[in-house]
Image (cartoon, grey):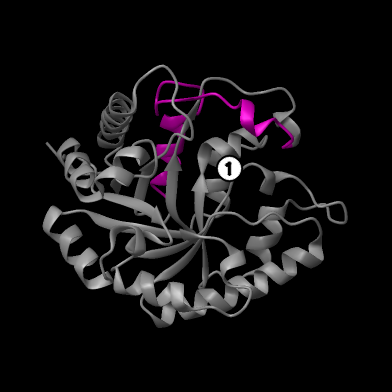
Amino acid sequence: MNIGLIGIVKDDLENDFFGTVVRLREIGYEGIEHGEGLLKKLDVDGSEFKGRMSEIGMSSIAYHTTKYSFQDGNEALLDEAESMGVERVCMAWGPAESSAEISEDAELYNKIGQACVDRGMMLTYHNHDHEFAHPSDCSMSYLDMLMSATNPELVHLHLDVAWCLFGGQDPVEYIKRYSRRISVLHMKDLKRLEEGCSEAKGDRESAQFTEVGEGIVPVDSILDAAKTCNASWLVVEQDRLGDLPAWESVSLSFENLKSKALEKQLTRSMV
């Protein structure tokens, strides 16, 4: 598996995107995830973006968007993602209140997933913690319902292990449950759990994050489970900084994750 990054040094990426990508590559990161609208911010076209990323030696792991951008049948974002050489289009937010809404989401994701396949990409769904709650009219969690209602060939999972734990679930169990559908593991760590997390109702804004391998998320067990799943990327993420500045944070998370992944024979040495 390769090690990538999303967020943490977002201010630097805003100010000097490609210069920051070079700096991340020097640390050892091999790919980044980003959101829609990046080409407009950078004032470049997809071909130029793809070429510059290739020169740096950095992959574009995922293009993040939401279901709301596609509810009117808009596929221009997929064309943009394809032009950038993106491997995945990732749906990063999708709260639903009922099984009917989940069915509507599943239909939409199957359609987008097919459009991604037609373009040589894949569609993934990235969870937060709310997907582990149960809609009022169903005994299954939102995420389990969504996975059950979507085509496994068209909709894959971009599993965030820390939000899984925060939502009251065991990330190792979810890796095993959806091993064939997991494409990316977001490696994130928490200092502690908040009250109510066992019911997937914790206060998301009070979640305290820390560098990967420094908190309570069972990184070693997750990497053991990752050996049996289809994930090709371990992506470092930290929603909010803790005690360390951003660049110290991305460096420590990388070194911790690289060391553990090498021990598990999950990635090659990047020294």
For label 1, the crowd category at 10 Å Cα-Cα, with few meaning under 14, some 14 to 19 and many 20 or more, is: few
Residue positioned 41% across, 21% down in the render: 214
Rendered residue at 84%/55% (across/down): 138
Residue extending farthest right: 137
Q: Secondary structure at mark 1?
A: helix
Depth check: 148 or 71 in front?
Answer: 71
Q: Is residue 135 left or right of residue 250?
A: right
Residue at figure coordinates x 66%, y 69% from the top left: 106
What amino acid is found at the position of numbered circle 1 in the picture? Glu
Of the pair 261 and 28, the residue shown nearer to us? 28
The quarter of the picture where residue 186 lies is top left
Q: Which quadrant holds residue 148?
A: bottom right
Q: Residue at x 81, y 52 (%)?
A: 135
Image quarter (top left, top right, bottom left or bottom right) of the C terminus: top left
Between 213 and 88, the one nearer to me in the picture: 88
Q: Which residue is labeled 1 in the image?
A: 173
Q: Tell whether 198 sits left or right of 47.
A: right
Q: Which residues are magenta?
A: 200-228
Give the image location of residue 93, x and y in percent: 59, 54
Please state if 193 lies on the left or on the right of 235 as rendered. right
